[in-house]
């Protein structure tokens, strides 16, 4: 076997292996909470992915080990209720009541992080937003973070929203594969064009995310998630039948519009505060743009090299686009009709 064919075989095998692992699509391991100060303690509503509970025999006991409230005088007493159906599809909601001594309360959670270190809990606390993650597990209620800290947190959240969401990554890879012909002929021109396309996505995402998060207009989460999957199917199949697909900038912007509604539904559901939400949304979209550009720049040189090989279409383009379209089609059916088959393929 030639070196080129060996490389192509290994690349395709790696793609198959990656898709064979549990894939959580764009939702990632994100949980959401709202924390309210009340007389004598805290009231917390926590919504978590249902798949995290599937492995737990006693979900309330497991939860109590990962959500805490403490004071300088000692641990707060927890009364937990749930799980109940959550606001988002395939999620479960808990109600937590913490009885605390009269003292500043530190709320802490590492929920889901024992399963995946990149898991995060996005919370609205006392009129501010905070993202609990590995290395940032504690929040002193009543002492809000600085604007700089909050913006940095949401830049990172936006970047992980791209890199941690398989459907988002597959969307960018589909755009790259569709631009392969132009990339081989004129790499610099093609790269500028691709940067414009992914930036168009960010612009569309910014518009609808802001509109929905500010309560101006929103779409049902099931509809937006289904359209996201359908968009990936469309782009991947177009790559197979059109060597030089046109209109990608418009498709990318449309995908961005839909995707913005998808994430905004989560922000609205947890009641993120209006105060400071505009710079927070801007920071989130900056994170998305930085992650997309990083993914694009990392893959583009490999794409240019691969497109110049005689085996590109048969051994890379066709298998990759078929895998992407097939996986996204499964997501579309599951999301559009609320089905739960093939759980290892995600949702």
Image (tube, rainbow, N blue to C red):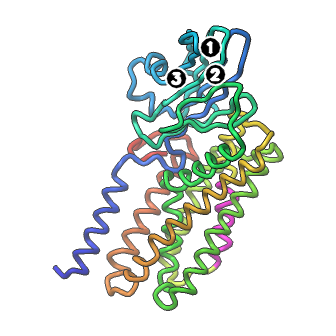
Q: What element carries label 3?
A: strand
**C-alpha separation, residue under disc 3 versus residue under disc 1:** 11 Å
Q: What element carries label 1?
A: strand
Q: Is mark 2 on a helix, strand or loop?
A: strand
Magenta-colored span: 247-259
70 horizontally vs 13: left or right: right
Q: Which of marks 2 and 3 is nearer the N terminus?
A: 2
Give the numbered dot on residue 67.
3
Whole-percent x and y of residue 23? Answer: 42, 48
Whole-percent x and y of residue 183? Answer: 49, 84
Choose top left, top right, bottom left or bottom right for residue 73: top right
**C-alpha separation, residue under disc 2 versus residue under disc 3:** 10 Å
**Of residues 20 and 298, which is closer to you in this image?**
298
Quarter holding the N terminus?
bottom left
Q: Examine the structure image and report whether residue 249 is included in the region drawn in magenta.
A: yes
Q: Which of marks 3 and 1 is nearer the N terminus?
A: 3
Q: Residues within 10 Å of mark 1 (few under 14, many from 20)?
A: many
Residue 253 lies, with reference to residue 328, above or below; the image says below
Furthest residue to the left? 1
Residue 145 lies, with reference to residue 200, above or below; the image says above
Give the numbered dot on residue 97.
1
Q: Name the residue under label 2.
A: 44
Give the numbered dot on residue 229.
none
Evaluate if marks 2 and 3 touch, with contact meaning CB atoms under 8 Å apart.
Answer: yes
Evaluate if marks 2 and 1 touch, with contact meaning CB atoms under 8 Å apart.
Answer: yes
């Amino acid at each position: 076997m030639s070196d080129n064919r060996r490389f192509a075989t290994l690349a395709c095998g790696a793609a198959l292996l990656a898709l064979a692992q549990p894939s959580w699509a764009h939702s990632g391991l994100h949980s959401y909470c709202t924390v309210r100060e009340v007389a004598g303690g805290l009231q917390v509503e926590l919504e978590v992915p249902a798949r995290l509970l599937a492995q737990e025999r006693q979900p309330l006991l497991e939860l109590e080990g990962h959500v805490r409230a403490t004071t300088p005088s000692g641990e707060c007493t927890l009364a937990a209720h749930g799980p109940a159906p959550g606001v988002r599809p395939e999620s479960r909601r808990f109600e937590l009541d913490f009885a605390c001594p009269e003292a500043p309360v530190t709320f802490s959670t590492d929920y889901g992080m024992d399963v995946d270190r990149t898991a995060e809990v996005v919370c609205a606390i006392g009129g501010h937003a905070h993202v609990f993650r590995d290395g940032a597990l504690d929040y002193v209620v009543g002492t809000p973070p600085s604007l700089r800290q909050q913006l940095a947190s949401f830049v990172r959240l936006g970047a992980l929203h791209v890199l941690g969401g398989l459907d988002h990554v597959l969307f960018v890879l589909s755009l790259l594969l569709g631009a392969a012909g132009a990339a081989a002929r004129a790499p610099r021109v093609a790269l500028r064009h691709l940067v414009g396309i992914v930036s168009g996505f960010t612009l569309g995402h910014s518009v609808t995310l802001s509109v929905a998060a500010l309560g101006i207009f929103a779409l049902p989460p099931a509809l937006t998630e289904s359209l996201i999957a359908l968009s990936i199917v469309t782009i991947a199949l177009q790559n197979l039948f059109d060597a030089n697909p046109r209109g990608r900038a418009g498709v990318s912007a449309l995908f961005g519009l839909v995707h913005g509604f998808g994430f905004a539904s989560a922000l609205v559901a947890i009641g993120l505060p209006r105060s400071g939400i505009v710079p927070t949304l801007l920071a989130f979209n900056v994170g998305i743009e930085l992650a997309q550009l990083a993914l694009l720049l990392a893959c583009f040189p490999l794409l240019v090299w691969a497109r110049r090989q005689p085996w590109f279409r048969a051994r890379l383009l066709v298998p990759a686009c078929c895998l992407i379209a097939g996986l996204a089609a499964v997501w579309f059916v599951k999301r559009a009709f609320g089905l739960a088959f093939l759980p290892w393929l995600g949702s």
